[in-house]
């Protein structure tokens, strides 16, 4: 067995544990073209960004991942320093970067452990990077591993539908004294809004009243939300600044927006994420950690095989060129004076020997990468 190939990956992350949502939004601003050019000039091969309600993650591939990670870290730290924050994302390199990515993707780094939503958000980050042509072969292999790991984690019961921000919002409503027979107002019918609706249904709540910027699926206009006078609201919009003013009737308002969407009293993401998290059982967490360990090994196997395909193809190309283009000219001096039938037999025998030898060489190479 060959030594395990060192990955060219680095990862940086900021979560609810490190800084509040408003500062994570500052760090998560898109890189400028000048920043991107500067990083690629320093050996950056690709970059994937994942920004969720509770975290930001940057995964990069580079000739020297520690150096590229430090350069990206400096850019993010400068943004935070401008806002008066001394927080900084730690740089993880190699297998530690892979392990961090995989733990995030199956909810082991989430406030609600085992949440299903984050896997889709990680996949969305890879898709967005692919559209920008920022996914190299190492990142492609990581993407494939994330998908495989998510499927395996669902089969193992580690990742469960319904665990996520929607689950957390509903759990918060119940702890605030909102009973399931209460008609909750859900403001925003995007992805998070639908997750909240599904969580309310699973918790046995009366079907909520839904409000959205554009009418769809029976949703009312956003302007009608406050006037409806619900006792509880979950706000899931993404306006650039606070806009929703809860009515006096509201006893609980949960704001899942990034940035905050509620102009009046509410429980925002930072308040929600500072509470007691929903944890996996010790047995489920051990299964999840074992899956992450296996995913790191599978990534190495996938990238090793990918690299070996290029090596084997190159060897086969050289073999064919030698057998069919060079052998005859190399033998020409030795076959001088031989009759045509004899020259043909010698050439054929030599080509056969070279092919058999190269076949054994290729077999040995395949064994070293399997």
Image (spheres, helix red, strand yellow):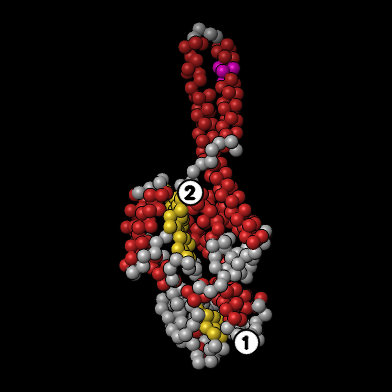
Residue at the disc numbered 2: 94
Tag shown at residue 140: none
Q: Residues within 10 Å of mark 2 (few under 14, many from 20)?
A: some
- Does the magenta segment cover residue 271? no
At horizontal 60% and vertical 67% (from top left) the residue drawn is: 279
Q: At 60% from the left edge and 64% from the top edge, which residue is drawn?
A: 114
The image shows residue 349 at horizontal and vertical percentages of 59, 17
Which residue range is magenta in the image?
Answer: 347-351
The residue at the point 38 percent across, 53 percent down is 70
In contact (CB < 8 Å): disc 1 and disc 2 = no
Q: Secondary structure at mark 1?
A: loop
> According to the image, label 1 marks what residue?
182
In-image side of 155 versus 237 (left or right): right
Asked if one can make out residue 78 in the rendered structure from this viewpoint, the answer is yes
Q: Does the image show residue 220?
A: no
Vertical relation: 87 (above or below) 312:
below
Q: What secondary structure characterizes most of the magenta part?
A: helix
From the image, which quarter does the N terminus lie in?
A: top right
Left or right: residue 90 compared with residue 120: left
Q: Position of residue 102 (x, y in %)?
A: 55, 56
Q: Secondary structure at mark 2?
A: loop
In the image shown, does 112 or 356 lie closer to the viewer? 112
Question: Image point 59% across, 21% down: which residue?
Answer: 352
């Amino acid at each position: 067995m060959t030594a395990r190939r060192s990955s060219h990956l680095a990862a940086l992350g900021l979560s609810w544990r490190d800084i509040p949502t408003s500062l994570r939004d500052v760090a998560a601003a898109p890189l400028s073209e000048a920043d991107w050019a500067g990083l690629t000039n320093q050996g950056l091969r690709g970059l994937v960004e994942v920004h969720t309600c509770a975290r930001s993650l940057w995964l990069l591939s580079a000739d020297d991942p520690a150096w590229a990670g430090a350069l990206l870290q400096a850019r993010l730290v400068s943004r935070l320093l401008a806002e008066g924050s001394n927080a900084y994302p730690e740089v993880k390199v190699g297998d530690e970067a892979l392990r961090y990515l995989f733990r995030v993707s199956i909810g082991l780094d989430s406030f609600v452990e085992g949440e299903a939503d984050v896997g889709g958000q990680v996949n969305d980050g890879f898709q967005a990077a692919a559209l920008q042509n920022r996914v190299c072969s190492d990142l492609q292999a990581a993407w494939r591993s994330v998908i495989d790991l998510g499927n395996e984690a669902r089969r193992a019961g580690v990742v469960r539908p319904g665990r996520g921000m929607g689950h957390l919002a509903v759990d918060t409503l119940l702890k605030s004294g909102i009973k399931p027979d209460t008609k909750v107002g859900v403001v925003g019918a995007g992805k998070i809004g639908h997750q909240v609706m599904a969580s309310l249904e699973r918790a046995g709540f009366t079907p909520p009243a839904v409000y959205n910027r554009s009418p769809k699926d029976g949703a009312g206009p956003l302007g009608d939300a406050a006037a409806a006078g619900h006792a509880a609201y979950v706000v899931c919009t993404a306006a650039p600044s606070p806009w929703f003013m809860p009515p006096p009737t509201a006893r609980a308002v949960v704001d899942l927006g990034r940035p905050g969407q509620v102009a009046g009293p509410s429980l925002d993401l930072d308040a929600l994420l500072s509470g007691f998290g929903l944890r996996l059982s010790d047995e489920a967490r051990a299964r999840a950690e074992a899956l992450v360990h296996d995913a790191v090994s599978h990534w190495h196997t996938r990238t090793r095989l990918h690299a070996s395909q290029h090596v084997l193809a190159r060897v086969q190309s050289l073999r064919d060129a030698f057998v069919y283009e060079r052998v005859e000219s190399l033998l020409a001096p030795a076959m001088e004076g031989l009759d045509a039938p004899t020259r043909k037999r010698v050439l054929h025998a030599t080509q056969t020997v070279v092919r058999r030898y190269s076949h054994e060489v290729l077999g040995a190479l395949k064994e070293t990468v399997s």
